[in-house]
Amino acid sequence: MVFRPFLRPSLAHLLMTAALLAAPLLSACDSNEPEPARPGSFTAEVGDTPLTGLAAFDDSYEIEEGGGPAFAVGLVAGDATQTVVLVARGAPQTRTYTLSADDETGEAGAFYFVLDDEDGALYVATGGTMTLTHASSDRLRGRFQMTAAQLFDPSQTVTVEGSFDAPRGEVEPTEPAE
């Protein structure tokens, strides 16, 4: 089975999919639905730099062209300058998923966004894993590790690894520090 469109390594598909997947997870909650009992969180390291923030997941996505359901885990740094989005096909299950940008070998994908004063950068996972240690209808817990290459300069790579506790819902990041 081929993953479409979220693992296709073209610029248009990556940017459109990343924006579509991240938008609901990063938006402020405007509904009357109750908030999760406990907010989600994550800890990670980007290289040797620690990163912490908020986490949430959503499993309401459909892959185009009959690809079936998909889910995404959104991890947003406390100052909203860095985001990790982990995406996998199917319903969330307690297991290990292989991260890749290759439609033929990957069963899941990941993006790492960096926003700073001058530029932003989008990194796409070229390898790694996401392991769900707990998967229920209202919460995912797990860990991940990936090597990611910058979209416009693949010679620039980062390693990102960490763990998360993500309730179903949205992430409302705080304002970036000035």
Image (cartoon, rainbow, N blue to C red):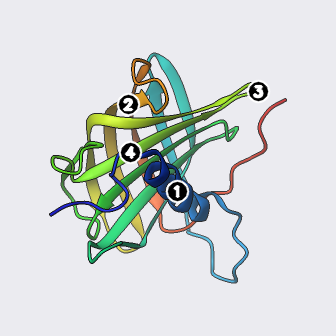
Instruction: Point out which mark residue 117 bears.
Output: 3
Vertical arrangement, residue 103 with respect to residue 84, above or below: below
Which of the marked residues, 3 or 1, is nearer the chain's N terminus? 1
Residue that extends furthest to the right in the rendered view of this protein: 178
CB atoms of marks 1 and 4 within 8 Å? no
- The Cα atoms of the two marked residues, 2 and 4, are separated by 8 Å
> Where does the C terminus fall, quadrant-wise?
top right
Q: Residue 148, labelled with which disc? A: 2
Residue 136 has which mark? none
Q: Earlier in the sequence, mark 1 or mark 2?
A: 1
Q: Which residue is mark 1?
A: 16
Q: Earlier in the sequence, mark 2 or mark 4?
A: 4
According to the image, label 4 marks what residue?
110
Which element type, helix, strand or loop, lies under badge 1?
A: helix
Q: Residues within 10 Å of mark 4 (few under 14, many from 20)?
A: many
Residue 133 position, x and y percent, is: 26, 53
Q: Is the residue under label 4 in contact with that under label 2 (CB below 8 Å)?
A: yes
User: Which residue occupies 42% across, 59% down?
Assistant: 72
* Image point (56%, 69%), residue name: 36
The kind of residue tagged 3 is Asp
The spot of residue 7 in percent (x, y) is 33, 52
Is tag 4's residue or tag 3's residue first in the polypeptide sequence?
A: 4
The picture quadrant where one finds residue 113 is top right
Q: CA distance from mark 3 to mark 1?
A: 23 Å
Q: Is residue 77 above or below residue 106?
A: above
Along the line of sight, the residue nearer the viewer: 59 or 135: 59
Circle 2: element type: strand
Q: Which residue type does callout 4 highlight? A: Ala
Which of discs 1 and 2 lies nearer the camera? The answer is: 1
Dot 1 crowding, Cα within 10 Å, few <14, some 14–19, many 20+: few
Whole-number angstrom distance, CA of label 4 to CA of label 3:
24 Å
